[in-house]
């Protein structure tokens, strides 16, 4: 849900002195209604942004229905909060951002999109091809493009395979530094270090530390983070945002989901 004055990019890149949390929702994994319930629970538990996407071939109608349902859910809660003196309406105003696997997974109902170059792909398609196909739609929809360097690290999972990525290995600290410098020189504002959804091992914190020495980049880290301790490791290494997806899908119900996200946001100091 778009904030009144602030651009999405400034919301994402501002320094708040804490590592923030993103809940990633794969539209393929539940109905739009359940996605909306999950997103609202996540926001209530302290997530500061909702990503919609994944590396699957979800058709854009499903992506769109999911974005719409999430936006409606957040708007309803913001309205309800505005009617109650004890509630904070602002809490619900978090951006809904597309995290696309390609140019098929777009929706005008999103607030923004991580407009990504999969920097270590060997395929032109993921370096610039999907972006060329998607850019005219993003322009037409009028959603904000967040310029993002996307680097897939070992083990890389499905996105590493599908994206034909030359994986960054845990000891490749100089290489990841070169990627971060390249991203900054291209003018990208975000750098996303990805271990792959459901990864057995999260991104090596030494890689995060090394990339973090490049100024001017907001660092997103995801893949394989399920526990508060793992989140803390990424946060201490310098992540500005931690992304979790599988954690949401694995929750047994909404109250389990609330507890799981709260455990992470509490250790990051995000809950009141
Ligand atoms: C995947 O980094 C995200 O693109 C989230 O990974 O599903 O392992 O949380 P998980």
Image (cartoon, rainbow, N blue to C red):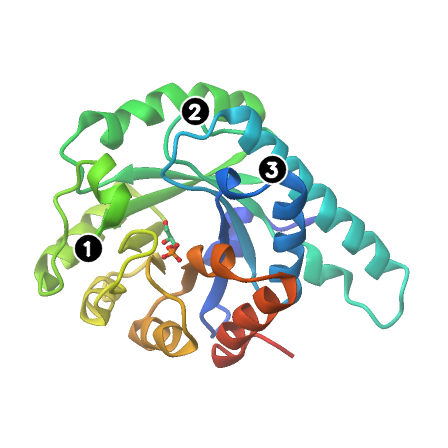
Gap in Å between the C-alphas at discs 3 and 2?
14 Å
Looking at the picture, tell me which residue is in the foreground, 7 or 89: 89
Q: Which mark's residue is nearer the viewer, 2 or 1?
A: 1
Q: In the displayed structure, would residue 5 be above or below residue 144? A: below
Q: In the rendered structure, are the residues bearing label 3 and label 2 in contact, judged by CB atoms less than 8 Å apart?
A: no
Q: Which mark is residue 155?
A: 1
Q: Is residue 57 left or right of residue 85?
A: left
Q: Look at mark 3 in the image and give the residue it sits on.
A: 66
Counting labels gives 3
**Which structural element holds mark 2?**
loop
Residue 108 lies, in percent from the top left, at 59, 28
Question: Please, which residue is most extreme toward the front here?
Answer: 252
Using the numbered discs, state the Cα–Cα distance from disc 2 to disc 1 in whole angstroms.
Answer: 26 Å
Tell me if label 1 and label 3 are in contact, CB under 8 Å: no
Asked whether 256 or 147 is in front, the reply is: 256
User: On the image, which quarter does residue 85 sit in?
Assistant: bottom right
Residue at the image point whose x is 45% and y is 57% from the top = 13
Q: Is residue 154 left or right of residue 187?
A: left
**Residue at 29%, 61% in the rendered image:** 215
Gap between marks 1 and 3, in whole Å?
29 Å
**Residue linked to disc 2:** 104
Count residues near mark 2 (Cα–Cα under 10 Å), then give few for <14, some for 14-19, many for 20+.
Answer: some
In primary-sequence order, the first of circles 2 and 1 is 2
User: Ligand 1 is located in which of the four quadrants?
Assistant: bottom left
Binning the other alpha carbons within 10 Å of mark 1 as few (below 14), some (14 to 19) or many (20 upward) gives many
In the displayed structure, would residue 90 be above or below residue 98? Answer: below
């Amino acid at each position: 849900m778009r904030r009144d004055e602030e651009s999405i990019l400034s919301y994402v890149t501002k320094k708040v002195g804490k590592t923030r949390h993103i809940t990633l929702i794969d539209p393929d994994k539940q109905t739009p209604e359940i996605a909306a319930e999950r997103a609202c629970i996540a926001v209530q538990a302290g997530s500061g942004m909702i990503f919609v996407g994944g590396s699957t071939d979800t058709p854009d109608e499903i992506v769109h229905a999911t974005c719409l349902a999430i936006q409606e859910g957040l708007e309803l809660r913001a309205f309800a909060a505005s009617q109650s003196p004890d509630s904070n309406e602002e809490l619900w105003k978090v951006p809904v951002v597309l995290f696309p696997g390609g140019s098929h997974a777009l929706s005008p109902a999103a607030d923004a999109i991580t407009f990504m170059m999969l920097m270590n792909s060997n395929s032109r398609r993921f370096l610039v091809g999907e972006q060329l196909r998607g850019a005219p739609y993003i322009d037409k929809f009028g959603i904000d493009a967040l310029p993002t360097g996307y680097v897939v690290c070992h083990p890389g999972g499905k996105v590493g395979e599908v994206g034909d990525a030359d994986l960054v290995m845990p000891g490749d600290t100089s290489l990841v530094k070169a990627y971060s410098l390249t991203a900054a020189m291209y003018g990208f504002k975000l750098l996303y270090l990805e271990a792959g959804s459901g990864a057995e091992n999260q991104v090596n914190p030494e890689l995060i530390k090394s990339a973090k020495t490049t100024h001017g980049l907001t660092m997103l880290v995801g893949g394989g983070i399920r526990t508060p301790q793992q989140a803390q490791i990424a946060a201490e290494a310098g992540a500005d945002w931690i992304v979790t997806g599988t954690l949401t899908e694995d929750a047994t119900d909404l109250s389990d989901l609330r507890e799981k996200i709260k455990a992470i946001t509490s250790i990051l100091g995000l809950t009141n």
